[in-house]
Amino acid sequence: MKLVEMKGITKRFPGVLANDDIDFSVGPGEIHALLGENGSGKSTLMSILAGLYRPDRGTILVRGREVWLRSPRDAIRYGIGMVHQHFKLVDNFTVTENIILGHGRTPLFHNLKSFSEKIAELGGHFGLGVDPGARINQLSVGEKQRVEILKMLYRGSDLLIMDEPTAVLTPQEAAELFANLEKFAESGRSVVLITHKLNEVLSVAHRVTVLRAGRVVAVMGREEVSERKLARLMVGGDIAAARREEFCRVGEVVLELQGVSASKDVGGQGLKRVSFSVRRGEIFGVAGVAGNGQKELAEAVAGLRWVHSGRIFINGVNATNLSPRTIADLGVSYVPEDRLGIGLVPGLGIVDNVILKNYRKPPVAGRWLINYRQAEKEAEWLVKEFNIKVADYRAPVSLLSGGNMQRLLLAREILGNPLLMVVVYPVRGLDVGAAEAVHRMLLEMRLKGAAILLISEDLDEIVKLSDRVGVMFEGSLVGILTGGSIKPEEIGLMMMGLAGPGVGA
């Protein structure tokens, strides 16, 4: 008997057929991978199983019994828990409060300290450490994802739906998490793994279901698949991989940090005397487990965080603690990790989002008002040039797929031919095709002579794109690796605070 069966699931949204007569099942003790491009219907299907959406047609069976999942509470009652790509957390609550919120076993009068101790122990067991007392709005995106995973583990779900669970983990932590998921499956429980990392599918999944355009195109056992076969099934053809040219003329220093220190949101030091430089035509990758200073580093360079000691130079100009507008005028573009919360305004359309940075400058800025005719021309050119799929230029950008949002954000930041690009986890949550498109955009900017500061927890991305890699641990730069000597395993050890190469500029 299957633990969960979904039969003939169909779900429509205005103008979109998200799921088209889908059959999907998970057996007891099974790790089942669900693959597909952005917009293929994966998240919609799993949101139906988690009780967030109701299908227009189809049935759901749990242990052979037909059920009606009218809310997430119903799903949790049947042992189904989901970690979403876009988090379902209360920003002003602490980690502990979010995890116990809505849990039926939480008493009216409770001891938060005892709950915090249990959550800290659970996080340590799964390699998902996070401060139980920290508020959600003080955490990075990666740390928020850990809270979501811990929330479902705390509830003891029989079926755990995990959307990109290893995106913010080191290779060692990912291996530990998968080992625990295998133990989870061996106990008779099940896991649905939504991931874009095809090597993860090959290493842990027992079966794989591939969706394309809302339909199932393949269901296979692990022994039947390969990375190339899965990629072809996802996009309907071969994907041209973005490749970094080994030789690129490196020019003068564009970004230089000298002993930079900055505070965290929650108190304490986020950056501790960090020093390095980035030159024209170079991608400098910064690796580290979420919460080790990467967020503070990006914000300090972009002018969004106060630097209390040390200096930041941009193209020879002392830019320490200058305003974000002034730093942008120095030729700096900023692509944050939270594309909807910080990078774009979700309720505005394509045109308004495109001109967010240049509305004060000709030809978009008219004498008294914004020249929307010129703004529309710029938006149309960007959409065509960067292959952004748009149905309506006036519709909110929140309706775009993740890949198209990221292309739009990168296109806007590339528009002014920046000297320096600060790019934070540019392919988070994107499918393999969209990720390759974003990587090609960054490599083209490198060849044009831009200096790129690339911050990512995805070590495959860091190794693939970077000329040099700096590794962060507890706010310090613990080492810098160069060129062909970069290995994910070595970076992973350094991310955990183990000894690495000496720091160099």
Image (cartoon, rainbow, N blue to C red):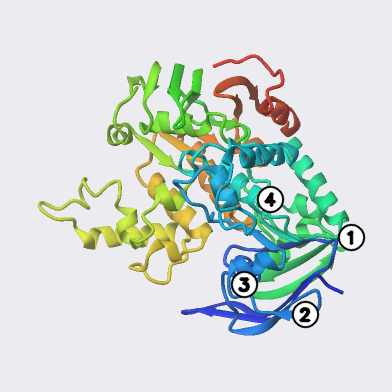
Cα distance, mark 4 to mark 2? 25 Å
**Residue that appears at 34% across and 22% down:** 320
Q: Which residue is labeled 3 in the image?
A: 48
Cα distance, mark 2 to mark 1? 31 Å
Which circle marks residue 308 in the picture?
A: none
Q: Nearer the viewer, residue 188 or 474?
A: 188
* Among the two numbered marks 1 and 4 on one chain, the one whose residue lies closer to the N terminus: 4
Q: Which residue is labeled 2 in the image?
A: 65
Cα distance, mark 1 to mark 4? 33 Å
Q: Locate residue 323 relative to residue 397 in the image: left or right.
A: left
Percent x, y for residue 15? 47, 79
With respect to residue 392, does 277 lie above or below? above
Disc 3 packing (10 Å; few <14; some 14–19; many ≥20) = many
Secondary structure state at the residue bearing disc 4: helix
Cα distance, mark 1 to mark 3? 29 Å
Q: Which residue is labeled 4 in the image?
A: 154
Percent x, y for residue 103? 61, 57
